[in-house]
Image (cartoon, helix red, strand yellow):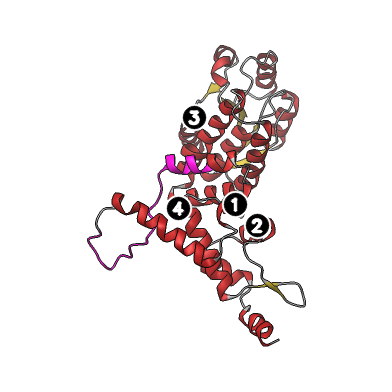
């Protein structure tokens, strides 16, 4: 009985305190608890979670192990002592590659920022393992080490491209793509969540033409536009030209950005793009971007639709247009 009372008295930290001490998001902590039983917090009479100091220490250890390249599924079953030993082993393995610290005041355990390529590899490992929790964590870590735009252009965009290529070559299954898209939808939404919308900012709508169901390119473009101050409205994928044009007219949009990813031999694409261009006022700019866009360059040229191959080109173009 005394042991039970001690355990309850130690569990005194609400999840808000835990997130500040561990730098982990509440949703991620709950996911680790629900899917992997990583921690087992106490519950108040009102069913609110209360965490102990040991729980917090365990979450910090799990996070350190994951930063070293492990997945949550690989380490969640370890106790705290085993986690600490694994972390120390990983640190020793990295020692020969580390430069000698000139300033002894800097702790030797500091975690250096990873490169875009390292983040990309870790994200793809999580995709292959079908570990949505770890993929979300990897994306969040990339946001810490890189600027938002660099993370989108050098991690997320090539990750989606690599995913598509692996799926088409039979190296991954459709379920890998579905899981990744589900995580990215939530991640990109959270990235823009809470951003104040300037009603005086120029408006742009984002979608994919009829028959184009892969939406991540359009979603990435909308996120980039929002980052540089556009009032970006994502309409969803696979829309007829009439619907996209109607939305652009209602929102008084200055630009319509279309994501074209796959397939590259879509026979309807030319007529859909031409219909869209005809239904919009001449001053409304139509832009096409995405992996399959190059296959339709002649149609785009004939329809007076601008072709931008990369997120960087889109960012630079929209940044200049916003100042006009």
1 or 3: mark nearer the eye: 1
The disc, 2 or 3, on the residue closer to the chain's N-terminal end is 2
From the top left corner, tell me how far across and down residue 304 is, in percent.
57, 17
**Could you tell me how far apart the alpha carbons at marks 1 and 3 are, in whole angstroms?**
35 Å
Q: Quadrant of residue 12?
A: bottom right
Magenta-colored stretch includes residue 223? no
The disc, 4 or 3, on the residue closer to the chain's N-terminal end is 4
Q: Secondary structure at mark 2?
A: helix
Magenta-colored stretch includes residue 107? yes
Residue at the disc numbered 2: 36
**Could you tell me how far apart the alpha carbons at marks 1 and 4 are, in whole angstroms?**
14 Å
From the top left corner, tell me how far across and down residue 291 is, in percent.
55, 24
From the top left corner, tell me how far across and down residue 71 is, in percent.
55, 50
**Residue at the bottom extreme?**
2
Residue at the disc numbered 3: 310
| Residue 63 vertical position relative to residue 178 in the rendered view, above or below | below
| Most foreground residue, 19 or 305 | 19
The disc, 2 or 4, on the residue closer to the chain's N-terminal end is 2
Residue at the disc numbered 1: 73
Q: Secondary structure at mark 1?
A: helix
| Residue 120 vertical position relative to residue 163 in the rendered view, above or below | below
The disc, 1 or 3, on the residue closer to the chain's N-terminal end is 1
Label 2–label 1 contact, CB within 8 A: yes
Q: Residues within 10 Å of mark 2 (few under 14, many from 20)?
A: some
Q: Residues within 10 Å of mark 1 (few under 14, many from 20)?
A: some
Extent of the magenta region: 101-123
Give the residue displayed 61% in from the left and 33% down from the top: 218
Query: Would residue 141 appear left or right of 1 to someone viewing this image?
Result: left
From the top left corner, tell me how far across and down residue 60 is, in percent.
51, 64
Residue at the disc numbered 4: 68
Q: Secondary structure at mark 3?
A: loop
């Amino acid at each position: 009985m005394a042991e039970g009372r001690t355990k309850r008295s130690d569990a005194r930290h609400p999840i808000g305190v835990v997130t500040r001490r561990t730098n982990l998001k509440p949703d991620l902590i709950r996911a680790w608890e629900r899917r992997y039983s990583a921690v087992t917090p106490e519950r108040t009479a009102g069913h609110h979670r209360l965490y102990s100091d040991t729980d917090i220490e365990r979450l910090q250890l799990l996070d350190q192990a994951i930063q070293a390249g492990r997945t949550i599924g690989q380490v969640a079953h370890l106790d705290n002592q085993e986690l600490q030993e694994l972390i120390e082993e990983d640190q020793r393995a990295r020692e020969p590659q580390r430069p000698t610290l000139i300033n002894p005041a800097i702790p030797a355990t500091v975690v250096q920022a990873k490169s875009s390529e390292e983040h990309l590899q870790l994200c793809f490992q999580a995709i292959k393992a079908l570990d949505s929790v770890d993929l979300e964590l990897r994306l969040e870590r990339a946001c810490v080490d890189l600027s938002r735009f660099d993370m989108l252009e050098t991690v997320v965009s090539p990750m989606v491209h690599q995913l598509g290529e692996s799926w088409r070559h039979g190296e991954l299954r459709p379920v890998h793509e579905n899981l990744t898209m589900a995580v990215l939808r939530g991640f990109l939404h959270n990235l823009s969540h809470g951003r104040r919308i300037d009603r005086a900012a120029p408006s742009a709508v984002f979608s994919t033409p009829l028959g184009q169901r892969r939406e991540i390119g359009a979603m990435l473009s909308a996120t980039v536009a929002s980052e540089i101050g556009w009032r970006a409205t994502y309409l969803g994928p696979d829309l007829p030209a009439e619907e996209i044009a109607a939305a652009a007219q209602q929102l008084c949009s200055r630009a319509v950005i279309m994501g074209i990813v796959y397939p590259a031999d879509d026979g309807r694409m030319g007529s859909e793009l031409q219909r869209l261009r005809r239904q919009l006022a001449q001053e409304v700019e139509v832009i096409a971007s995405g992996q399959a866009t190059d296959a339709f360059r002649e149609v785009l040229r004939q329809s007076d639709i601008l072709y931008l191959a990369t997120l960087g080109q889109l960012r630079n173009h929209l940044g200049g247009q916003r100042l006009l």
